Structures are given as structure tokens and as C-alpha cells.
Amino acid sequence: MTEDPEPAYCDFCRLPRPAETVEATVDGERYHFCSAHCRDAMLGADRVFTRYHGHRRFQPGVAAIDAVLPQGCPRNAFVLCSGQAGTRSGAIQAELVWRALQRGEPAVVVTFQEPPASVVERFVTLDWNVIPYLETGQLRVVDCFSYRMADRSDSPGRVSTWNSHLADAVRPVTERVRDPTDIDAVTSKLASALDGGPGRDAMVETGVVVVDSLTELGSLVQPVQAYDFVKDVRALVCKARFVPVFACATYAGDPETFPHDLAYGADGLIDLKLDGDVVEDGLVKRLRVRKLDGVLSYQRWTAYEFTAGRGMVAFDPQAELAASTEAAVQAVGVADAAADAASDTGTATAEGSTTAPAGDAGTDTEDRAVEMPDGDTDDGGERTHDSGDGDGTGGEDGSGPEDPAADGG
């Protein structure tokens, strides 16, 4: 069986090109293109696309997501992470951002549920220090929460020293929305964060955006406004800039209402749930990529938990349960063997002892009689000798010999 030949790629767009290609000579070099459009574009450009998968797909870096996306995630995808309370969707978003920062890419957090200082604290609880990335502007925040704290957050004595420290660190890279019910204002502040401001590169074909709660957004505005916000963000951020957006939604009522009914409009759907059928008397966090347009995905449930410093850890709950049960059985067996060994040692010591207790020493001496030579008997101190009449009695009562003088007298 012969393998298919390696496809030839366009020297500009890096996509596979047909057998009949368009050619051009530039600075003495011969180039091959998939179309006249790419040829003309190269002649007027100062660079070509050299990252065939890089600028279109990326690996999110979250264990349970990477495991089911062998081709990575499209960079122009709007992904809805929908699940129950307790599935730690906020930690998933924190790791998506952290992995982007580690790759050298920028990230934007849009927060409706927490103030910026608490957003930073979420990373800290996972042992991820994002303060250096705030200082360089690589991490940016769109604040749609602090309007609730107006004229109160800066009052002396009402904010902890640690929160003040974090708030001071994040303030220079925060775009504050004074009225989050104004959807146009939210969209405008998001665009400002993506542009980065003076001295910073705009986010185009790089980085990641996370929205902490579309459920909270839905509680602030009318449904039609909420739908428009999602559609605008998908168009202006995902499709125009090639920057992926991961937006979370928590079940708080009817699962057929906003934002859980966005299955038709979202490019990707990630389901999060607490499953009580896996382990008896326990709840296991599980994740599934239900769909993701444009790439191969394995639609299977994966159990996960979070560990400080490592982030999400995927595991097999049945295997973990079997291993823990076997370890417990072995531990009980070792303990029983040790107890049996200790018991046997005590019994052997008791049976092999020949020393009587101190309190029984006199009794032992009195009860023991040893026959001595010549009819003497050692009864432990007194000695008697049979003589006289030879009948062995030594007298009428056997108490001693009769007096010979008495018999002869």
C-alpha cells in the first residue's frame, strides 16, 4: 500500500496548493502559489504566513481539554463553558489565561462577578503569580463589577491590606465599565483592552479572552441585549482578530434560556458537571467538549480536579477507587500480620518461662518434695531419718526414735 505524497504548500498562505500552480519570481527566487490572489498579496507584503497551524489553531494547555482536541482549538472560536455550580469554571478560565501568559501571549479577563483584585487572587490560590504580567501589560482586565463598590472600595479600614496591594497592581491595566447595563460601553472597553494602549501590541492572532459569567450579564440586561453582546464579541474579537473567547455560564434556572441556549451560535461547547453516578456517595467533576467547529474532538467525559501549581489534573475515578481500595486492603493485611506476630511472640514468652512469680516462691518450695538417698527426704528444709525398730515408723507416731534405755529398763 503506497502512502499519499506529502502535499505542496502555497509559499504565501501556507495552505495546500493544487498541481497547477501560479508561479512568480521575486528577487531572483522562484515561488509557487495556490492562486493569483496569493501571488499578488505576496508582491505587496513584507512577510508571508509561516505558521500554518500556529495562527489558526493553538493548544489551550488545560489537561482535560487538550486530551480531547488532538488538532488543537481554532483561534477564531467563541467557546461556551456551561455547567453546574461547583465545577470550578473560574479555575478553568484562570488556567486558560495562565497558559497563554506562559506561551508569551497576552490575555484579557472580562469580570462581571468579582472585582479585579479578586481576579488576581484566583491565580494566587493556584500558586500562579501574575503580578509581573500585570506590570508589563500582558494581562489586562475589563472590570464590570466595581460599579457595585462605588464610593466604598477606597474607604480607609474597609479594604484589607492584601486586597489593596493586589488592587494597586491591577489598576493600571484595568478598563473600568461604570455602567455594565450599557452593552456598547462594555464592548468598547473590551476593544480598548485588546488594543493594549500606548506602547503595547494589539491582540490580533494571539492571546485569549475569558468572560467569567454570561449568567451574571443576563441578570443585568434584557435577553436581546445579552444575545447582541455575544454576537458582537464573536464577530469583532473571534472572527475579525482571530482571538478565541471562552465564556462561562452557570446553571441558575431553566437550561433552555440565555446563555445555555447559545448552542446554535457558539463555535464550541464545553459541558461541566458534578456526576454522582461514578463513585458511590461522591460527586466527581467531569468535562466534555460537546462540539468545536473546524477541528477533530473526542466527545467523551473526563474527570478532573485542580491542584495548586499544576492546575487541572485529569484522572480515572474508577481506577483511582480500585487502587485506593487495594491499598487499604493491603494496609489492613499488614496491620493484621503485625498484630498476629506480636501475639505469637507474647505467647511464646509466656510458655517458655520457668521463673515463678515472687509472691509464690514459698508455696513452690513447700509443695515440692525430693526423695533423698538412704531414705532421707528433703521437704524443703526439714529432714527425717527412719530407724529404731526397723518398721520404718521410728515410733508410734513416727515423730522420732524410741529410747533404747526405756526398752531395756
Image (spheres, helix red, strand yellow):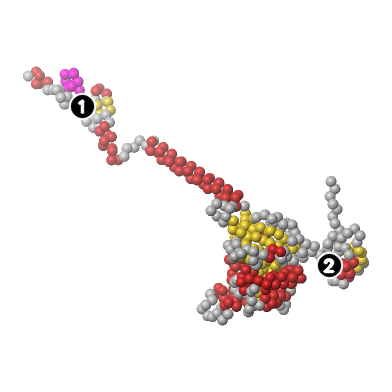
Q: Residue at x 86, y 64 (%)?
A: 11
Q: Nearer the viewer, residue 331 or 390?
A: 331
Residue 166 percent coordinates (x, y): 59, 73
Q: Give the answer, above or below, for where 133 lies relative to 367.
A: below
Q: Quadrant of residue 19?
A: bottom right
Q: Looking at the rendered structure, which numbered label has been put on residue 288?
A: none
From where the camera sits, is residue 132 visible? Answer: no
Measure how far apart labels 2 and 1 are at the Cα level: 128 Å
Left or right for 162, reference 366: right
Residue 268 position, x and y percent, is 70, 62
In front here: 370 or 277?
A: 277
Q: Label 1, secondary structure: give it.
A: strand
- The quadrant in which residue 393 appears is top left
Q: Amino acid at mark 2?
A: Val
Q: Is residue 169 above or below residue 409?
A: below
- Residue at 68%, 65% (x, y): give it: 262
- Image point (22%, 30%), residue name: 382
Q: Nearer the viewer, mark 2 or mark 1?
A: 2
Which amino acid lies under the numbered mark 1 shown in the image of this protein? Thr
Most common secondary structure along the magenta stretch: loop
**Label 2–label 1 contact, CB within 8 A:** no
Q: Which mark is residue 384?
A: 1
Q: Residue at x 15, y 22 (%)?
A: 395
- Mark 1 Cα-neighbour bin, 10 Å: few <14, some 14–19, many ≥20: some
The residues colored magenta run 384-394
- Percent position (x, y) of residue 31? 90, 64
Q: Is residue 230 magenta?
A: no
Picture coordinates of residue 215, whole percent (x, y)? 62, 68
Badge 2 element: loop
Viewer-nearest residue: 291 or 160? 291
Q: Which residue is mark 2?
A: 48
* One can see residue 178 in this view: yes
